[in-house]
Image (tube, grey):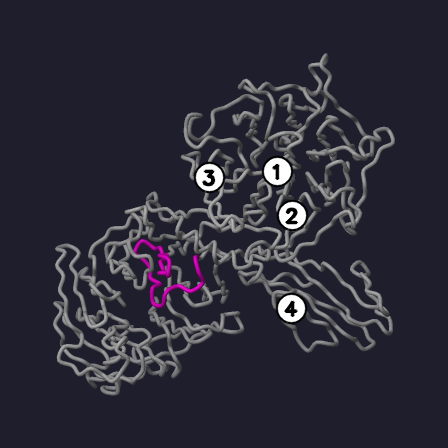
């Protein structure tokens, strides 16, 4: 896609577009990922359109020099065939693999540190245009710099280049700030085009700000004097409909059918393939905000716009939504002057502004919709922090939190309906469920509340009435933990200090089962719900237990592990899921006992954490909340995927026992800043096999370090040491979750896991013949082919 570099004040408020790549992260994202993800909770939508997938508000993550950029002014982005992202800046050229930057400057042979534009050609050479340094390129294999020179055009050495493009016939077009256009042919011949006042078939101006290559191989040229179309034989001037003819920005949509032209007055014109202006897909010229230029149209058809109020997004040609841009240097929201934008091959979006660095949206930035309390919005959540959730038979989800308000959230529309406030005048609710009859039960320390949403009737019952106060911390005395409804409609309430209580559907206490009686261990109840036999099951640090009404006691579930069991769920076909520390197991219930089916654990890269919530979706995929993030487990493929702040979660830990699924399919979890909602059907792992590259091989010979990357086969001499291999798998999607492994035949007994570094160092190798294999694994659990 075409990218634009903002010119310096010497040429006014014009954008110098750079090269379009014809073929279709982790940076050091620091603490900013976490901080900005928390911020985005406060910026999300309050009311959303009715559709299955809850939309999300985009909140790009800022990258600056502190993250490794060579400069905070990036003028162009492009990708090569290997998947590296190249960045042109005013202090060098950078190559980014998702984790690390490699930077070229004048010390490495460049003719200038100010790189205005870059273009990756069909040979994978990286062309660059400089400020007062002409044009050059990096060779594809060696990445050494070569300057473009021609004795017939000596001015090439020192000219300022604002734009580059390659047409399908292999020609490289060079757009300059003052000398017009140069056409560099594959055979090395050069042709110059300049403005001539007496020739209508010439350029209207020698100030060239951008190129766009049309699908038929022709070329659109933007200049300060107007728009030009090169058809392979002649220059045809194409007038703009407004009073100004000075082009400020060009952008061609990915399908090549639409060209967008912005003039210096801020007018944006849409041209079709034959160069005729056509109506814009969004609001009229009088609408707010005003569009100053089209940055890009993404793979889902959304427009990303440079507007007078900042970065804007228009989905399906509809109203323009302002995209919140948070700057850490400014400590708040900012309105940036946008230079360039880019969509990488993985679908991630990149935006650059003058002296503001980069802002990045991962490919699935809209996976998670975030909702929070906003003091200036009465339609937002009432509770700043959501501590308990319960699905409703009507399709919504009940929420309670730190403001003490019971509210119903509709995950389809995003509508929030308050019901009961305050739930308790003094205490924050601990737990909530809805019965099959639609009655809401809320547990507060010392009180059980029965609420009928239809009649708004509220009944309050003391949990510790006629009971002795235990010799325990008064902060937990009488606090309810888990609640569940049994097959008879009775409500079971597990108290932290008194055991388990049984209540009638009308709110009458039927009995209390004390800890250390009726088979109930004196251990905190970690989870409780109806089991596959229709009886109440509960879990604790001693395992899994079921209520036996004939024996009038809790008995151990036969076949279940006698280990701390944090969560469990019943699936289809008698499947019972059991969540242990660092493991998720599946069992089959045959009516009397559980039989172990399989385990997803360390070998499948399941994090060594204790689950805090568990939902099994309609496709049989398990979703586990934890303090490490949200974990997706596919029982068929055994693939494990961990989602965290890098994927759009507001913060890694969801609140304990708040992960629930609405009857409409969305999964919801409470956080300390509101709720997060996602559609599990839309969250499919990327099964594309990644491309693994051996980026560098070096060794020390004497006191000298030698680069032997291209030495195949590699012969190590006697005395050589510190053989260092660096493997890379360029990706900008959760690069911190990638991992690598090495195996040197004749030396390693098996694969050696090196984690996310991708590096291996052999200090000394005994004489012999070796074959090295390297593999990389993506965040979605897909291994690359061996290199």
Q: Which mark is residue 313?
A: 3
Instruction: Give the spatial CA distance, label 3 vs label 1.
Output: 17 Å
User: Label 1: which residue?
Assistant: 3
Q: Nearer the viewer, residue 289 or 611?
A: 289
> Which numbered dot is residue 94?
none
In front: 750, or 642? 642
Residue 458 pos. (x, y %): 14, 61
350 and 103: which is toward the camera: 103
Q: Write down the residue under mark 2.
A: 71
Closer to the eye: label 3 or 2: 2
Q: CA distance from mark 1 to mark 2?
A: 17 Å
Instruction: Between label 4 and label 3, give the one nearer the viewer.
Output: 3
| Magenta residues, start to end | 650-675
> Could you say where residue 415 lies in the image, as x and y percent from the top left?
29, 48
Q: Secondary structure at mark 3?
A: strand
Mark 4 vs mark 3, CA separation in Å? 41 Å
């Amino acid at each position: 896609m075409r990218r634009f570099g903002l010119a310096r004040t010497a040429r006014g408020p014009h954008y110098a577009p750079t090269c379009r790549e014809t073929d279709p992260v982790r940076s050091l994202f620091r603490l900013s990922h976490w901080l900005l993800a928390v911020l985005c909770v406060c910026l999300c939508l309050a009311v959303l359109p009715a559709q299955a997938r809850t939309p999300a508000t985009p909140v790009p993550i800022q990258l600056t020099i502190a993250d490794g950029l060579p400069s905070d002014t990036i003028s162009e982005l492009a990708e090569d065939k290997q998947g590296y992202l190249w960045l042109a800046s005013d202090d060098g050229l950078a190559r980014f693999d998702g984790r690390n930057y490699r930077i070229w400057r004048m010390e490495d042979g460049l003719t200038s540190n100010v790189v205005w534009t870059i273009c990756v050609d069909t040979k994978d050479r990286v062309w660059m245009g400089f400020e007062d340094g002409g044009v050059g390129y990096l060779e594809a294999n060696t990445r050494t710099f070569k300057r473009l020179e021609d004795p017939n055009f000596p001015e090439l050495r020192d000219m300022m280049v604002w734009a580059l493009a390659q047409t399908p016939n292999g020609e490289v077009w060079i757009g300059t700030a003052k000398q017009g256009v140069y056409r560099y042919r594959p055979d090395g011949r050069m042709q110059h085009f300049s403005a001539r006042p007496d020739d209508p078939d010439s350029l209207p101006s020698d100030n060239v700000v951008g190129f766009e290559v049309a699908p038929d191989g022709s070329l659109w040229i933007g200049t300060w004097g107007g728009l030009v179309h090169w058809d392979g034989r002649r220059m045809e001037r194409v007038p703009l409909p407004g009073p100004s003819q000075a082009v400020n920005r060009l952008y061609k949509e990915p399908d090549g059918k639409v060209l967008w032209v912005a003039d210096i007055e801020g007018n944006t014109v849409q041209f079709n393939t034959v160069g005729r202006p056509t109506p814009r897909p969004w609001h009229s010229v009088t609408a707010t905000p005003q569009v100053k230029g089209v940055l890009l149209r993404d793979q889902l058809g959304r427009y990303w716009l440079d507007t007078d109020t900042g970065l804007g997004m228009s989905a399906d040609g509809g109203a323009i939504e302002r995209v919140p841009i948070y700057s850490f240097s400014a400590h708040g929201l900012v309105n940036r002057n946008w230079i360039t934008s880019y969509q990488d091959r993985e679908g991630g979006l990149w935006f650059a502004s003058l002296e503001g660095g980069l802002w990045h949206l991962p490919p699935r930035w809209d996976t998670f919709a975030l909702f929070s309390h906003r003091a200036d919005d009465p339609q937002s959540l009432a509770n700043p922090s959501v501590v308990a959730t319960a699905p409703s038979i009507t399709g919504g989800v009940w929420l309670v939190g730190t403001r003490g308000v019971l509210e119903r959230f509709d995950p389809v529309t995003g509508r929030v309906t308050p019901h009961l406030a305050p739930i308790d005048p003094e205490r924050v609710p601990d737990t909530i469920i809805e019965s099959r009859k639609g009655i809401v039960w809320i547990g507060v320390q010392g009180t059980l509340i029965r609420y009928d949403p239809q009649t708004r009737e509220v009944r309050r019952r003391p949990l510790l009435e006629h009971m002795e106060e235990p010799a325990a911390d008064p902060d937990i005395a009488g606090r309810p933990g888990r609640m569940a409804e049994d097959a008879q409609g009775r409500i079971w309430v597990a108290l932290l200090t008194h055991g388990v209580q049984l209540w009638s559907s009308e709110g009458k206490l039927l009995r209390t089962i004390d800890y250390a009686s009726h088979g109930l261990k004196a251990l905190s109840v970690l989870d409780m719900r109806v089991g596959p036999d229709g009886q109440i099951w509960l879990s604790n640090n001693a395992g899994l237990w079921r209520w036996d009404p004939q024996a009038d006691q809790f008995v151990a579930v036969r076949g279940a592990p006698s280990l701390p069991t944090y969560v469990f769920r019943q699936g289809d076909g008698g499947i019972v899921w059991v969540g242990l520390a660092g493991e998720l197991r599946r069992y089959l219930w045959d009516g009397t006992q559980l039989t172990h089916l399989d385990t997803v654990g360390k070998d499948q890269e399941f994090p060594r954490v204790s689950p805090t919530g568990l939902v099994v979706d309609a496709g049989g995929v398990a979703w586990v909340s934890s303090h490490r993030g949200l974990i997706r487990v596919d029982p068929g493929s055994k693939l494990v995927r961990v989602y965290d702040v890098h994927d759009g979660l507001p913060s890694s830990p969801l609140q304990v026992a708040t992960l629930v699924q609405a009857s409409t399919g969305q999964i919801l979890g409470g956080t300390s800043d509101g709720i997060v909602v996602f559609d599990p059907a839309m969250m499919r792992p990327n099964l594309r096999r990644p491309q693994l590259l051996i980026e560098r091989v070096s060794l020390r010979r004497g006191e000298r370090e030698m680069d032997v990357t291209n030495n195949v086969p590699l012969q190590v001499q006697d005395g050589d040491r510190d053989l260092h291999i660096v493997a890379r798998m360029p990706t900008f999607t959760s690069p911190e979750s990638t991992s690598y492994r090495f195996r040197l035949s004749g030396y390693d007994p098996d694969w050696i896991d090196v984690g996310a570094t991708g590096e291996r160092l052999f200090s000394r190798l005994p004489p012999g013949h070796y074959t090295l294999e390297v593999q990389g694994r993506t965040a979605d659990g897909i291994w690359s082919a061996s290199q």
